[in-house]
Image (cartoon, rainbow, N blue to C red):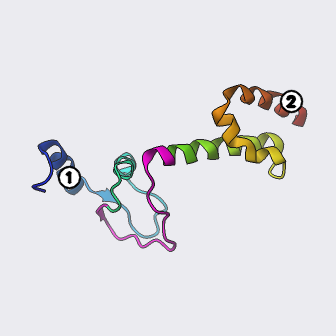
Amino acid sequence: MEHLDERDREWARALVQDPICWDDNHDSLTNGQHRSCALRAAGVPYLPVEGRHLPAAAKPDAVDARTHAQQTVHGFWRDVLVAVFGPTHPLVNAAPLLVRFPALRLLLSSGRQRRE
């Protein structure tokens, strides 16, 4: 850890002193979700965990924090559009427009009223 400054060394030590736990048959972390997200945002491709977890499928490659946030926000608005208009409606693919032009979100209330 010689290449790390003192603050980063403290964080690295914390991973060993209070390890993130993940064992087989668990579908999520038992602790450390925030730490693993921060490490992912920092571009850390691997981190040690206590336990033994062998995922059945390969996880997607890490992406930078901005891209991850954009994907999450687009996914959220796509889910909202599916809930309002149904999964086969052509507007379901308009999620990026709702992100870019917040005024379009006002149309969702009229779509929701039509479905109810």
Q: Of helix, strand and loop, which one carries label 1? A: helix
Does residue 82 appear in this view?
Answer: no
Q: Decide: is 63 above or below 46.
A: above
Check residue 58 for magenta coloring: yes
What residue do we see at 9% from left, 55% from top? Answer: 2
The residue carrying pointer 1 sits among few (fewer than 14), some (14 to 19) or many (20 or more) residues within 10 Å by Cα, namely few
Disc 2 designates what residue?
113
The residue carrying pointer 2 sits among few (fewer than 14), some (14 to 19) or many (20 or more) residues within 10 Å by Cα, namely few
Disc 1 designates what residue?
12
Three-letter amino acid code of the residue under disc 2: Gln
N-terminal-most mark, 2 or 1: 1
Left or right: 15 as drawn, with respect to 73: left
Q: Position of residue 81 (x, y in %)?
A: 75, 41
Q: Are marks 2 and 1 in contact (CB under 8 Å)?
A: no
Which sits in the foreground, 23 or 79? 79
Q: CA distance from mark 2 to mark 1?
A: 52 Å
What residue do we see at 33% from left, 62% from top? Answer: 46
Three-letter amino acid code of the residue under disc 1: Ala
Query: Magenta segment, which residues?
Result: 47-67
Q: Position of residue 69 (x, y in %)?
A: 51, 43
Q: Of helix, strand and loop, which one carries label 2? A: helix
What residue do we see at 34% from left, 59% from top? Answer: 21
Left or right: 52 as drawn, with respect to 105: left
Which sits in the foreground, 104 or 10? 104
Q: Position of residue 53 (x, y in %)?
A: 39, 70
- The outermost residue toward the left is 2
